[in-house]
Image (cartoon, helix red, strand yellow):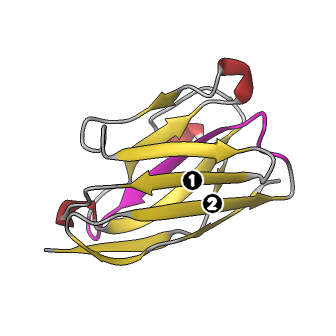
């Protein structure tokens, strides 16, 4: 079992930056693919970023909506996942969730992920 706890959310003005963290416990995340998803009120949960396990070179993938603005990274020694978010827009407002997948490879669908955090709120004002 992997327990995930997100932090770092908050209120920021458009154009600002935030860095989210996801601390894992229970097991090492070395062999897991990790990802961030987000869910805005009244909308489905959307894929934001993913990073594969070390055996696949920590490959990353982003949808066009956040590419070049968001950066996912991981520190396996600290058992922590990060999401650096720059040039934030009001449409980035959502609850952000981190997730871990036993599969190890990048996946953009939430059904591929086995463990989830409780989420952290990000609000971007215009």
The residue labelled by disc 1 is 82
Numbered tag placed on residue 17 in the rendering: none
Where residue 20 appears, x then y in whole percent? 51, 62
Quadrant in which residue 26 is drawn: bottom right
Q: Residue at x 74, y 21 (%)?
A: 55
- Which residue in the structure is indicated by mark 2? 22
Q: Is residue 15 above or below residue 2?
A: below
Could you classify mark 1 by the number of other residues whose Cα lies within 10 Å: few (under 14), some (14-19), or many (20 or more)?
A: many
Q: Are marks 2 and 1 in contact (CB under 8 Å)?
A: yes
Q: CA distance from mark 2 to mark 1?
A: 6 Å
Instruction: In the displayed orientation, state which residue is furthest to the top.
Output: 56
Out of 1 and 83, give the one closest to the viewer: 83
Callout 2 environment at 10 Å: few (<14), some (14 to 19), or many (20+)? Answer: many
Q: Quadrant of residue 65?
A: top left
Part of the protein shown in magenta: 28-42
Image position, residue 16 (x, y; %) = 28, 66
Q: Is residue 36 magenta?
A: yes
Q: Is residue 28 left or right of residue 37?
A: right
Residue 93 magenta-highlighted: no
């Amino acid at each position: 079992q992997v327990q995930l706890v997100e932090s770092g959310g908050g209120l920021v003005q458009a154009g600002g930056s935030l860095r989210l963290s996801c601390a894992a416990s229970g097991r090492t995340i070395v062999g897991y693919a990790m990802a961030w998803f987000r869910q805005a009120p009244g909308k489905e949960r959307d894929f934001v970023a993913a990073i594969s396990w070390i055996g696949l070179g920590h490959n990353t993938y982003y949808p066009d909506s956040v590419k070049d603005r968001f950066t996912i990274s991981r520190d396996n020694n600290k058992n922590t996942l990060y999401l650096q978010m720059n040039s934030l827009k009001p449409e980035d407002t959502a609850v952000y969730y981190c997730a871990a997948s036993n599969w190890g490879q990048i996946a953009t669908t939430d059904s591929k992920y086995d463990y989830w955090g409780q989420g952290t709120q990000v609000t971007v004002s215009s």
